[in-house]
Image: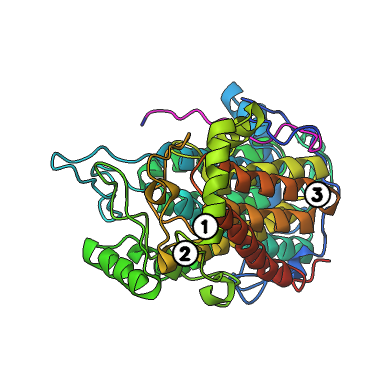
Amino acid sequence: MKKYNYINIGLLLITFLVSSCVEDLPTKYDFTGYQFSNLDANAGQWKLILHTSNEQIPLPIPAAAGSPELLKELAEAKEKQSKATSAQQEAVVYWTNNPLLRWNEIALELATKYNLIPAPNPDGSYPVPDPANPSKYPQFPYSHPPYTSRMLAYLSVAQYDGLIMAWQYKYKFKRQAPYQLDPQIKTSYENNGLFSYPSDGAVIAKASQDILTAMFPLEKEFLAQKAQEHLESLIVAGINVSSDVEAGKLIGTEVAKTALSRASTDGMKNAQTTRAKSDSIKNAAKERFGWVWENQETPQRMIGLVPLFGKVRLWNVPNVEAIRPGPPPAPGSPAFEESAKELKQYANNLTTNQRRIANFWNDGLNTYTPPGHWNRFAKEEVVAKKLSPVRTARVFAYLNMAIADAGIGCWDAKYYYHYPRPIQTMPGFKTILGTPNFPAYTSGHASFSGAAAEVMAHFFPANAGQFRTWAEEASMSRIYGGIHYSFDATAGLTQGRQAAAYSIAKAKLDGVD
């Protein structure tokens, strides 16, 4: 397999209030001196998302300090540390003491790698990726925004449940780290006194490997190599012995199984439809409202993008109707004409700054999509606040559940209303970004961003104003680009904020604050 060079996106400490459109990404950021602001000793009591008990995955009692078993493991750890290769030492630096951030980076880079549409067939139609045969062209998956939002939610929730369980056992057994038990073992990270059994790093490595392998099956070998590198680094770094790692792997494996069991029945496999089903959805919308979206591409990509994503199982929103907006204005109505006039004015008078915003938030093909953009912002804030791994996982879990729910709600509205894009209703109108192959109402960018901004504002209230400004920018960017009407964006922001409210309400009851 070709080696994939991952960009360590989002780990540069950027001051949020400087600029809302900083897109230059650092190629490497060393935060080995990262110090947790709090060890969150009571995190084992936090409320789980997919599991019911913080000891639902049983672990063996670890060998006691001074026992022959543990002394042997410490001797093995010293030997591995003394014989570490330069590659292993570099891995210790890379993975750091908050490796969830690295696995999130890997997830975003895989989303970028697979966010590509296939070439057309000889007859002008477009082939669709087949999850049952991922290596067949076009390769599975096509990591469009709905797919990426779902992937990130499963990854983050599995990581969070796994770390809650790890913290429960850490403070139950209170096994000291190797560098505390043997002065000849040196820690590569902060000497913070965090208990070592089970290894939180091993939980993250195994859960992340298994979730991402299911989501990106062609990357199985690469992900196994990264997980092995990560697991080896835990002992070389002086923070774990082998039994710590094995216990962490057990938790990670089991939480991933639970998450993937949910994923297997959440409805995603039916999201991309046949033409007959797509036509029935279109006809139903025409009967309701008298309009339909028609794909303006030649040749057309697929049959619209995942028309039944709106039926995928939600995380915290009770049902899609709870966040489904009212209907948009009918084409030709005064409200529609006002929005159409606005689009023409922007097209004819777009400023340099507006064009910059449109390009910055485009997040189209071969990018990590709008959900990934907000995960990047979350990483920046986590590093700035020096959150512990378990508190980091909490941020990403509630953030990505809200983003996924917003996306599901948005796609429900898109295909329920089946509203045409500006290039369909406004003859001769041109966009600066190209037009997506799915209905307009509501805006996906606005929905994803409205949800993300509110969750970020909840966890990091000092920067709430900046997050909400970014959400407004993301929303407006699609109007500047000529892709959406203003009412698509306004309704999308509201829809995203409503989805976030359910996620935030659940977070307030999880026993953390």
Binning the other alpha carbons within 10 Å of mark 3 as few (below 14), some (14 to 19) or many (20 upward) gives some
In this rendering, the answer to whether 288 lies above or below 216 is below
Asked if labels 2 and 1 touch by Cβ distance under 8 angstroms, the answer is yes
Left or right side of 161 for 310: left
| Quarter of the image where one finds residue 86 | top right
Dot label at residue 465: 3
Please tell me whether residue 3 belongs to the stretch shown in magenta.
yes
> Of the residues shown, which amino acid type is indicated by label 2?
Ala
- Of badges 1 and 3, nearer the viewer stands 1
- Residue for badge 1: 336
Residue ranking furthest to the top: 86
- Of badges 2 and 3, nearer the viewer stands 2
Position of the N terminus by quadrant: top left
Please report the residue visible at 59 percent of the width from the left and 32 percent of the height from the top.
Answer: 350
Q: Secondary structure at mark 1?
A: helix
Binning the other alpha carbons within 10 Å of mark 2 as few (below 14), some (14 to 19) or many (20 upward) gives some
Please tell me whether residue 48 belongs to the stretch shown in magenta.
no
Spatial CA span between label 1 and label 2: 7 Å
Left or right side of 283 for 89: right
Provide residue 486's location: percent of width, then percent of height: 58, 52
Dot label at residue 138: none
Position of the C terminus by quadrant: bottom right
Provide residue 501's location: percent of width, then percent of height: 69, 68
